[in-house]
Image (spheres, rainbow, N blue to C red):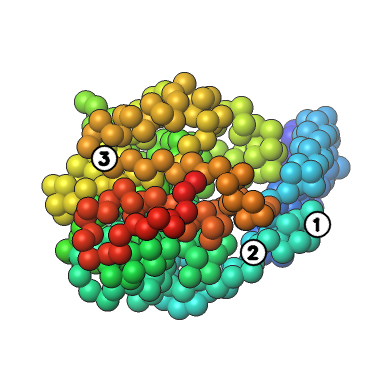
Amino acid sequence: MRIGGRWVPSRRLAGGLLVLAGLFAAGRLSRELVPADWVRVVQLGLGAAAAIYVALVVERLRNTAVVVTSVLLCLAAIEAYAVIEYPRPINIHTPDLWGPQAVLGWGARNPGSFHHTEIDAKTGRRLVDVDYTIDEHLNRKVDSAPDGPAVAFFGDSFTFGLGLPDADTLPQAFADATGRAIRVIDLGFPGYGPQQFLRALETGLYDGLLQPSRLFVFQTAAWHAERSSCIADFVKHAPRYRLIGGRPELAGSCTRWWSALTRSLFTGSATYRAFVAPLVERVRPADIELYLAIIERAAELAREKYGVPTAILYLPDRDYAGRTGISDDEIMRRLRDHALIVVNGALDPSAFPGQPLLIPGDGHPTAVANRVRALLVRDAVQSLFPEAPSRTAGTPRP
């Protein structure tokens, strides 16, 4: 058989194909045997090995193969440096905590108790060691009134209560702050954004739980615009919306925005995460407009379909919002102008000496932060819940 202008014996060709197939199989197997952050390093190294082999057996491709080998080894070295210097925490979950979900992209797979451990990759320090209870409706468990009109909390890992036991989540804190006289539902899940809030209402996904309802609460921040615009790679299976005539219209999923090849080659690497993402994953004013439009449309559906108001628990991030060209105050004003109840969730750490508001090394809210924000929400919507205890003089304030 002729390769590169030379005749190569079939046995030699078969041996070469066998070697390349073995290297390819090793690359696939590395996903199972190698820590996730090191898979790309191993695969780049195996690619370099394949190029070296080609250089040895195909003379006319030798120079090209040497160049490819050099490039792949350099990329492997850069990737290894990024993994070492900018490691992600190591997360260990009970299997089947979450998986694919047809409407929202992903979600809890089974009811039960699931353990989550998070470890600092550099120090080995345990950041999180907690159990999550998923109820029969595949939502985070909340102990509250068993029946009656519902207060539904929508949002991401902050609402879900990532890193915290069931007793310390925001929805549970709200249920406690209202004397457990109200049925409270936690519909938050890690990685969700405004698009899951809107899509759930459009499709009636939770109608069995939300009839009847009295209030929807959505916890959000300006950085959710990365999710609603499909900029963040981890939302690749989320619903995607586009603004058409000033209204958000469903346009498939974010998978269509991030091509599979792009994700495979670039966005999944530590190099991309550490050096490229800060430069290219920037939220533009148009992304903020889509973010606000999605929330506003969800609030319209809440009024039209469920007859309830929507409260926005907004977490200001002045530095982040400033980079988008719009301030936190302007975002909150825009939402208020669309008849949403906006609760400013900013907390002053100096008001809580010795009580961290974020889980150290992790960044999610602590039980202290959730309890204070739950009181802020309760106070803002007190008139909707005459059966709940009223605010007392001893209520903590931020």
Q: Quadrant of residue 119?
A: bottom right
Q: Which residue is nearer to you in this view: 199 or 329? A: 329
**Neighbourhood count class around disc 1 (C-alpha, 10 Å): few under 14, some 14–19, many 20 upward:** few
Q: Secondary structure at mark 3?
A: loop
Give left or right: position of 118 versus 201.
Answer: right
Give left or right: position of 198 versus 23.
Answer: left
121 lies above or below 45: below
Residue reaching furthest to the top: 325
Q: Which residue is mark 3?
A: 340
Q: Position of residue 329 (x, y in %)?
A: 41, 29
Q: Earlier in the sequence, mark 3 or mark 2?
A: 2
Q: Residue at x 53, y 69 (%)?
A: 165
What is the three-letter code of the residue carrying label 2? Val
Q: Residue at x 74, y 44 (%)?
A: 86
Q: Which residue is mark 1?
A: 123
Q: Secondary structure at mark 1?
A: loop
Q: Position of residue 386 (x, y in %)?
A: 21, 61
* Residue 107's disc number: none
- Give how far apart the Cα atoms at labels 3 and 2 are: 34 Å
What is the three-letter code of the residue carrying label 1? Thr
Q: Residue at x 33, y 71 (%)?
A: 180
Mark 1 vs 2: CB contact within 8 A: no
Nearer to us: label 1 or label 3: 3
* Residue 128's disc number: 2
What is the three-letter code of the residue carrying label 3? Leu
